[in-house]
Amino acid sequence: MFGYFKRSLDVAKETGAKILKADPLPWSKEQLLLSLNSQEDLKKWAIGCDKDIGGYSNASLELTPEGKVKFSGNISLELPKNNPRIEKSGYAAIKSKGRGSTLFGTPCWDTTLYRYLSIRAKGDNKKYLVNIQTDGPVISDLFQHRLFLRKPGEWETIMIPFTDFILTNHGVIQEPQIEMYRERVRTIGISLLMQPGPFCLELDWIKMINTDETIGDYDRIHFGR
């Protein structure tokens, strides 16, 4: 109960600060969403794979000696023997945990003042997906985009325009597409599907970022850029 009221007080302070500092076009270069550098950071993430439903993949999330978070394991496409209804297997995923309910609802991130989601990562040759869950009416909806790693084995900073994410549900692209509810981003995650064999992805941080020429999507919408 104490945690519930503390979170409510924190949200009230954040909201009050935004009102007092209101600006028609506030701008900042970046804002940290999630750091992945400590055991405390690890507690903010949930991990899962098809082993949870009887499959044979495995996945772990651990802190490296260099102080980064490593998401690794092995993907198996073998179908669960005790559940004949499952026709496909082979996935692993991590997702940031929700920040807990408050008197003002569930705290979410407002991403509207930034153009890009940026991830500092070091990966392999696997094809990973970035998943964004918003506070929308369909809880299984995800906005997804490939995490394009161009230099496997090296640290890279990947920048993905928020407007490039595609609405999916259980891995299926939805029609019609709708705009992401960017004022209410609940969770951010990373997954990989149907790629047998070992995988390893190290993560440093996840941020919202502008370039010097962008103010969220304001300039794109109002000036056609």
Image (cartoon, rainbow, N blue to C red):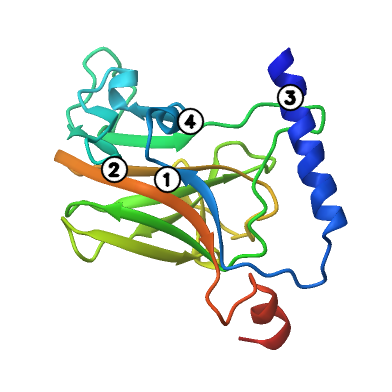
Q: Nearer the viewer, mark 1 or mark 4?
A: 4
Amino acid type, mark 3 = Lys
Q: Residues within 10 Å of mark 1 (few under 14, many from 20)?
A: few
Measured as percent of width and height from the top left, residue 65 is found at: 22, 35
Look at mark 4 in the image and give the residue it sits on: 44
Determine the image quadrant of residue 175: bottom right
Marked residue nearer the N-terminal end (4 or 2): 4
Q: How far apart are the two marked residues, 4 and 2, measured between alpha carbons?
A: 23 Å
Q: Nearer the viewer, mark 1 or mark 3?
A: 3
Proximity of marks 1 and 2: CB atoms separated by less than 8 Å: yes
Amino acid type, mark 4 = Lys
Give the answer, above or below, for where 21 lies relative to 83: below
Amino acid type, mark 1 = Gly
Marked residue nearer the N-terminal end (1 or 3): 3
Helix, strand or loop under label 4? loop
Give the answer, above or below, for where 54 lies relative to 152: above
Helix, strand or loop under label 2? strand
